[in-house]
Each structure stands twice: as C-alpha cells, then as structure tokens.
Image (tube, rainbow, N blue to C red):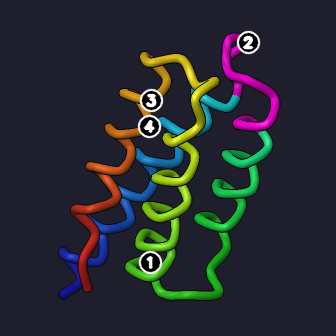
Amino acid sequence: MADKKAQNQKSLEVAIQTLTQVASSPTTPKNIKKNLTDLITNLKSGQDPVSIRAANAISQIDDVTQDPNLPSYVRVTLWQAVSTLESIRD
C-alpha cells in the first residue's frame, strides 16, 4: 500500500516537472502557459486524492491539446505527461 502511494507520488512529480518545462518554454503560447500553470497548481494542491487530481489533469490536458495554435512538439510532450498521469491509480 505504501509502495503504491510512493509510486503515485513519484509519477505525479514527473508529470508536474514535464508540465512545468512546457509552461516555461518561450515557444509555448501564452494562453497555453496560463492553462498549464493553473493545472500545475491544482496538481500540487493536496485537497483531493492523487488519483482524482490526476484524472482532472488528464481531462484538462486533453482540452489544451485540442488548441490549433499548439506546436506539435508541445502536444507530444503533453501526451507524455498524460501517459505518466494515467499510471496513477488508488
């Protein structure tokens, strides 16, 4: 049980790091940066269980990746974060 919790926390940290890199990139459009910054804040808050925060983040990232102004390499990086977040289970 504790091992799974530690694994979930590590996956969450990896996803946050990936999202932070995208949000801090000068090539990322400003509206995407704002969405990702809000998303990172929600992931870091401890109000909900990790699995719920991850599921909400996946949904929000899916919305962000639909933006036609998003460069394709940023989209791929966001999908990597989604893949990491999908590994989080309670």
Question: What's the magenta region?
Answer: 24-33
Q: Which mark is residue 50?
A: 1
State which quarter of the image contains the N terminus: bottom left
Q: CA distance from mark 2 to mark 1?
A: 29 Å
Cα–Cα gap, marks 4 and 1: 19 Å
Q: Amino acid at mark 2?
A: Pro
User: 34 or 9, which is in the foreground?
Assistant: 34
Q: Which residue is mark 4?
A: 78
First in residue order: circle 2 vs circle 1: 2
Q: Residue at x 24, y 77 (%)?
A: 89
Query: Is disc 1 placed on a helix, strand or loop?
Result: helix
Label drawn at residue 26:
2
Which residue: 67% across, 73% down?
Answer: 45
Mark closer to the chain start, 4 or 1: 1
Residue at the spot 22% in from the left edge and 62% down from the top edge: 87
Residue 75, numbered circle: 3
Is residue 68 within the magenta segment? Answer: no
Q: Earlier in the sequence, mark 2 or mark 4?
A: 2
